[in-house]
Image (cartoon, rainbow, N blue to C red):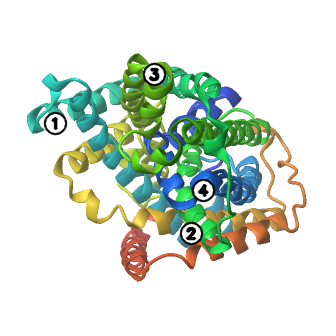
Amino acid sequence: MSSATAANEPLVRVIGTFGLAAAIINITIGGGIFRLPANMAGSLGAAAPVAYLVCAIAMGLIVLCIADAGSRVSLTGGLYAYVGTAFGPYAGFLSGALLWMLGTFATAAVATVFASSLGLLIPSLAGRGMEIGLLVVAFGFWTLINIQGVTLGVRLNSIATVAKLLPLLLVAIGGLFFIDTDNLRVTAMPAVGDVARTSLLLIFAFAGIECALVPSGEVRDTVRTVPRAIALAMVTITALYVVLQVVAQGILGSGLAQATVSPLADAAGASLGGWARAVLLGGTTLSMFGYLGGMTLSMPRMVFALARDGFLPRALAAVHATHRTPQAAVVFQSALGLTLAISGTFEKLAILANVSALVLYLGCAVASWRLRQMGVQGSPSTGGAGFTVPLAGVVPWLATAVIVWLLTGLAADEWLGFGVCVAAASIVYAVTRANRS
C-alpha cells in the first residue's frame, strides 16, 4: 500500500449502513439462488437446510474477521486495503489482484446469463445480435449512473435490492401456506462428508461481501457502519436462503431435485399459479441486472485503488471534479467487463473464482489478527476505535481452520490456475516498482 490515508482520499463518504447492507445483499444474491434449491435437494434431500446452517456458521466466522478489519482500515479497496495495511504492499497487491480478477470475471459471467435470460423472457430480444445489444445497454446504463455520483449509484442499488427481494419474498411467504409437511420429513441424516462437500459448494452462494466492501473509502463512520451492515446483510441472506429451501422442498417434494432450470419459479407456479411463475422468471433477470449495478459500483473502486498505489496507470485514479467519482476507473472496468461478456473467453478462467475467494478470506482472517496486534484503529474522521469482535483472540484462527478445511476440497487444476495468476501478479508487482517509487 502507498501512504494514502483515509483523510486524504479524494472520494466522498456518503454510504451509510443501509446502503452498504443493500450493496452486500445485492451482490451476494445474484442469479444463483433462483436455481440453488434444486442442487441442494439433489445432494441432501430434505436435510438440505443443514448445509445452509453449516455454511452460515463458517461465513459467520469469516465475516467477523472482515468486520473487524473493515472497522480499522477505511481506505478504498476493501480486502486489498486490509491485507496491505497488515502485511505490506506485496501481500496487499496479490489480494487486490485476486479480488479484481474474481469480481471482473463474475461480472462478465452474470452479464452473459442476464442477456440470454432476458431473451428467453422476451423472445423478440433473443439471438446473438440482440444479446450483444442488451449487454451494451446494461453496461452503458450502470456506467452513466455511477459516473454521476456514488449517492445516485447507492440509491439505485438499494432500489434494485428491494426489487429483487420482492419476488423471493413472494415465494418465501406465500409458499408457506402450500407446504406439504410430509415433503420435509428427514428419514436419515446425511453423512458428515456429504454435508461438508455440499457446504463447500454452497459457501459461494454467500460470497460477495469481498466485492461489496471495495468502496470502503466512501463509507461514513466505518467503525459502526461496516459491522452493522455486514450483520444486517448476512442475517437477511441466511434467513431468506433457508426459508426458500424449506418452501421449495415442501411444495415440490422429490421433484425439487429434478427442477434444475427454475426450481423457485416452479414452486411459485405449483403453489400460486402461472402468474407467480412468470414473476419469478422476471425476478431472475431483475436480480442479475441489479447485480451488474452493484458490481459497477464496487469493482471500479478496485481499479482506482490499484492505480492510486501505482500498480495501474495513474490516469485510472482520476476523480471527477464535480461528482467526486473515479470516472476513468468506472469506464475502464465497464469496458473490460463488456468485452469479456461479449467474447465469452472468461469461461476458461471462471474456475479460478473459487480458490481466489477462499484465499482472500484466509488473508483477511489473518489480517484481522495482525491489525489488532499492530494496534491499528479507525481514524477519528471515520469513527474512532475498531469494532469489538466477540472472542477476538480465537475467531481469526477458527476462521482460518474452516477456510483451510474448505481449500482441501479444491481440484488440482484450480490450484494450478491459481499459481499461474499469483506468478503473473508477482511479475506486475516487480515491473511497476519504479512507477510506485
Camera-near label (4 vs 1) is 1
Q: Residues within 10 Å of mark 2 (few under 14, many from 20)?
A: some
Q: Residue type at mark 3? A: Thr
Q: Position of residue 238 (x, y in %)?
A: 67, 43
Q: What residue would you read off at disc 1?
A: 132
Q: What is the secondary structure assignment of the residue under circle 3?
A: loop
Q: CA distance from mark 3 to mark 1?
A: 32 Å
Q: Residue type at mark 1? A: Ile
Q: Position of residue 255 (x, y in %)?
A: 45, 45
Of residues 200 and 434, the one drawn nearer to the viewer in this rendering: 200
Q: CA distance from mark 2 to mark 1?
A: 37 Å
Camera-near label (4 vs 2) is 2
Residues at circles 2 and 1 in contact by the CB criterion of under 8 Å: no
Q: Residue at x 50, y 60 (%)?
A: 96
Q: Residue at x 70, y 51 (%)?
A: 73
Screen quadrant of the N terminus: bottom right
Question: Disc 4 or 1, which lies upstream in sequence?
Answer: 4
Camera-near label (3 vs 2) is 2
Dividing the picture into quadrants, the one containing residue 136 is top left
Of residues 307 and 43, the one drawn nearer to the viewer in this rendering: 43
Q: Is residue 92 left or right of residue 286?
A: right
Camera-near label (2 vs 1) is 2
